[in-house]
Amino acid sequence: MTQPRTDTLEQALAQNRFEWWDSLRELGRELKRDKPGLIGVILITSLVLMAVFAPYISPHDPSAQDLTARLAPPVWYDKGTWNHILGTDHLGRDVLSRSIHGARVSLWVGTAVVLCAGGFGVVMGLMAGYLGGRTDAFIMRWIDTQVAFPGLLLALIILAVIGPSLTTVVVVLSLNGWMVYGRMTRSAVLSIRQSPYVEAAEVVGCRWPRILFRHILPNLTSPLLTLAILEFARIVLAEAALSFLGLGIQPPATSWGLDVAMGKNYMFMAWWLVTIPGCAIAVTVLAINLVASWLRLISDPQEREKQYARHMAGVMRKNLLAALEKEKPPEAL
Amino acid sequence: MTGQAHNRPGDSPLVAVKDLSVLFDAGRAGFWGGKRLIVHAVEKVSFDIHPGETLGLVGESGSGKSTTGRAILGRVPVSEGQIFFQGKEITHAGKNQVRELSRDMQLVFQDPYASLNPRMKIIDIVAEPLLVHGVVKNIREAAKEVARLLELVGLPPDAGARYPHAFSGGQRQRVGIARALALKPRFIVADEPVSALDVSIRAQVVNLMQDLQSQFGLSYLFIAHDLAVVRHISHRIAIMYAGNIVELADRDLIYDAPVHPYTRALLSAVPVPDPPVQRARQRITCPGEPPNPLNPPSGCRFQSRCPYVTQTCRDAAPVLTQRRSGQRAACWNC
Amino acid sequence: MTASPKIPLLEARDLVVNFYTRGGVVQASRGVSFQVDYGQTLGIVGESGSGKSVAVQAVMGLIFTPGHIEGGDILFKGRSLLDPAGRKFVRQVRGKEIAMIFQDPMTSLNPVFTIGTQITEVLRHHMGMTKDQARHRAMGLLDMVDINAPEKRLKQYPHEMSGGMRQRVMIAMALACEPRLIIADEPTTALDVTIQAQILELLADLQQRLNVSVILITHDLGVVAQLCHRVAVMYAGRIVEVGDADQVFAAPVHPYTQGLIRATPRLDVVTERMVSIDGVPPDLISPPKGCAFFPRCDQAKKACSRMQALVELGDDRHVSCWCAAKENVR
C-alpha cells in the first residue's frame, strides 16, 4: 500500500483511474530488456504501419503494368534501376509496391479471422465449459466432427461453390479455425469454475452470463491472447497458401501468396519474384512468433518475476544497501 | 455473551435440518462400469439453528461438514431428508428460489486468497450482491453502501479502490465478510473462515464475526476442522465423523464433559501451547484413518478406530440419544 | 553467540536472503542466526511471511531466482555450505546428512513411480546398496514409521495413499540415508488433527530413538510445545526471541511472543473472547525502521524505532527488544 491515504472511497477511485497507464509503461520497460520480443514488436509495428500507409509509401501502383520493363532485376544488378528497386514481374509491375500492398491483405485477413474465429470459439467454449451437460456434449461433438473433417477439403468445397474472394477467404479460415479456441477455452473454464471466487459469485446470486463474462473471461485473457497471436501467424500462412493455390485473393488484387504463385513460373529467370514475397511471409510469421513467445513469458507471473530479477537485482541491491546504511544507528552492534 | 439463544421459549428455529443425506454419484467402477460408486457424504444429519445462535460444526476432511453447509445453501442436491428456513421447506429449491434465498443466506469462504476475483476491485466485489439483486443500479450508486460495509468490517474506506492482491489474508477475509453482509442476510455459513489465517489474525476475524452477530442478530453455521477455534464463537457444537453427527451438545459440555470417544480424541489431538502441560496430558490417540466414504462399514463408522469397540458397534449404527440436558451423542458404549 | 567452544551441528550466521520482485526487494530474511546441537529439536515459529521457511530453504539450497542469498553463512559441522569451493562437501551433506520433509508430500513424491521404487532409488543412489539390500531396508524403514504391511505398500503409488500415510512415507524417505539433521517444514499443516497427533508422536519417538537433530518449522505453538527442546520465534525476517522451549513458553519476554502465546487458543483454559494482536504483519518490501513489531506493540517506546540486536538474557536465551532487554539484563 504505497499510495497516499485518502478519506473517502470516491476520492480513492478517482485517484486510481490512470493505473493502467503505469502498467503499460512497466510493460514497455520489460519489453526493452527482451531483445527478441522487442525485434518482433518493432517488425510487426512497421508491418502494420506499412499496410496502413501503403498507398502513400509505395512508389508505384501495384497493378500498373509496364510491358516495356518486364522482369527488370533489382537495383543492384547492372540492368536494375532505382525506378524499380526490387525489380518487376512478368507484366512489368513493381515488386516492392506489390509486396507493400500484400501486407494489407495478410494483416487484414489475419485480424478478421482471429476476431471471427476467436469470438465464436471463445463463446462456444465458455458455454460448453460452464453450462456442461448437454450443451457441453453437443458443442464438443460438433468440434470433434469438424476437426476430423479435412480443412482443405472444406475450404475447396466452399470456395468452389461460392467463388473465391477476400470475404470468402475470411469465412473459410474462420470456419476452419474456431475449434482450437473452443477447446482451449472450455478446458480453462473447467478449471476456473472450480475456484472459490466463481462459487462466491454464484452464492451471491449472479446469473450465468455475468459469471461467464465478468468472472471467468477476464481471467482467461492471457492464455487466449497468446493463442490468438499464434493463430494469427497460422492464418497468414494459410491465406498465402490459399492464394498460392488460386483459391484466395484474385488478381488484380495482390497478396504475397498470389505473387509467389505467379513468380514460380519465372523462378529460374527472375528469382526475386518468389523470394521477395516469400521473405515477407517468413518475416511476418517470425515476428509474430517472437512476440508470442515474449507474451507467454510475460503472462506467466513466476517467469516474469525471474526475468525481472535477472535484470534488476544489481540496481535494486545497491539501492537497498544504501537505504539500510542510512538507517543503521551508530550505536548498533 | 448473548448465548443460550436456543433455549428461549417460543423461539422457532431459523434453520432446521431433518435427516439430511447427501449421496454423490462417483461414476462407475470396473472396465465395463458394472458397479456404481456412491459416496456417502452426509447421512441422516439433523440439527436446528435458532436466530442469533452459532452452531459450530466440527469434523475432519471428508466428514461431510462442508457438504452439509452447502446443502443448506442449495448448492448440493439433497438425496433424502428435509431442510427448512424460517419454517419454509427449501429442500429442493429451484434456481430462482435459491437466488431469492441468497438474500437471506450467505457463505464465507475458507481461502481468502482464492475467493476474491483477482481482476476485480474490492468495491466491485462487495457491491456485486447489491448489483445482481437490483438493490443498486450501478457501482457509483453503491459506493456509499460499500464504504459503510468496509468500515463495518474494519477496513479503511479507500480499500475499495484497490485490487485483492494489495491486501493480507486477514484483510481479504474481512472483504469476504463484507460481501456476505451486503444483502443483510440472517444466516451465514462460514466454511472454515479462519483456517487459512495466521494465529494473530484469527482472533481478529472471530471477534469481528462475534461482534457482527450481536449487532445484527445473525445466525452462523461455523464450520471448523478442530475444536480450538470454535469454542469462543459457538453456542452449541456438532461433531461430525464420516458423514454422521456423533455428538451434538452445548458448547461447555463438549469441552468439559465430552461423551463420544471421537470427541475426546479430537480434544486431545489439539496440542496445548505449554510444554509441561502438553507433556503431562493424557493423550487419546485414535489409530488409523477415517473409513472409505465409497464403502463405509456397517454399524458405527468410528468402529475401526475406537478403543471401546464391541460387537454391538459392528452390528448396528448408533443414533443420537439424549445424555445430559443439552447433550446428545451417538454411541453404544458411553 | 555461545561461550562454549563446542561446534554445533548446524549454525546459521546472519543469514540475509532477498527476493527481487517487481514490487520491490522483499527482505525475507534479515540477518537470521540460529544453531542446532546434536540430538536437539529446534522449533522455528512464525506466521506466514515471517521468513521461517526461507531460512531453512537456504540451508537446503532451495533459494532460486528471484531469490538470492546476500550474506551470512551456514555451517554444517563447522564447514560452510555456502562456500563455492566446497561443492563436493555440500553435495554429500544435502539430501544425505540433512534430509527434508515438506508440508505437502505430493510435491516431493513422484506420482508415476511406486513408493518402493522411490525409496530404493534413494538408497541405491546415496548408500550404494544393491537392489535386494535396498528393498529390505525400505521395508524396515516403512516398519519404522508404523506403516503396516510394508510389502504391499511398497507396490503402491502415492495417489493410492491417504495424506497421513504419504507423510509417513516422506518421513521414511527422509530417514533412509541415516541423516544427522531432519528439517521438517510444516509437516502436519495439511493433515487432519487426529492424523497430526499421530505424526507428531511418531516424529517425537523417532527423534529420541535415532537421536537425530530436528528443525521444525511451524506456525502452531502447540506443535512446538509438544516436540521441541528449543524454540526460535521469527517476525518479519528476524528472530525476535530464542531459548529453551519450557522457559520461553513459561515466561515469554518479547511482546510478540507474549501476544502469540495469548492468541493461540487453548483447550485447557477458558476465556470469554479470543485474544488477538491488532494490526497486520509488516510488508517485507519496506519493513518499519527499527523493531518490526513496533507498530503493533502495546509496550512500544521511543527507542523501538531504532534497531535492536539479539541480547542475551542468560541460560542461552536471547531476545531482541528494547523494553524487555533493559528490564532483564540488569
Image (cartoon, coloured by chain):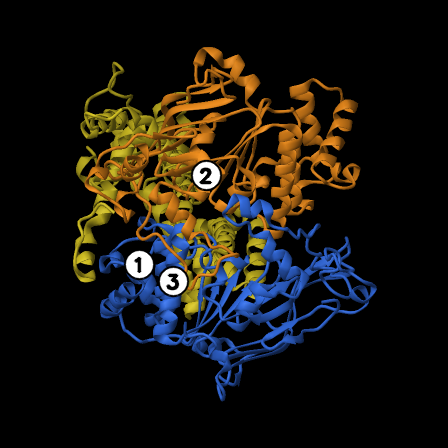
Query: Does the rendering let one see residue A119?
Result: no
- Give the number of the disc on residue C247: 2
Which chain does the residue under circle 2 lie in?
C
Q: Position of residue B180 (x, y in %)?
A: 39, 67
**Left or right of C241, for residue C115:** right
Chain A drawing hue: yellow
- Outermost residue toward the bottom? B10
In-front residue for pair B8/A75: B8
The image shows residue A4, relative to residue A326, as above or below, that is: below
Q: Secondary structure at mark 2?
A: helix
* Between marks 2 and 3 in the image, the one whose residue lies nearer the viewer: 2
User: What residue type is disc 1 on?
Assistant: Ile
Along the polypeptide, which appears first: circle 3 or circle 1? 1
Q: Chain of mark 1?
A: B
Question: Chain C appears in which tint?
Answer: orange
User: Few, some or many C-alpha atoms within 10 Å of disc 1 (few <14, some 14-19, many ≥20)?
Assistant: many
Query: Could you say where residue A112 lies in the image, as x and y percent from the top left?
Result: 35, 50
Do the dots labelled 3 and 1 sit on one chain? yes
The colour of chain B is blue
Q: Is residue C305 left or right of residue A225?
A: left
**Numbered tag placed on residue B207 in the rendering:** 3
Mark 3 — on which chain does it sit? Answer: B
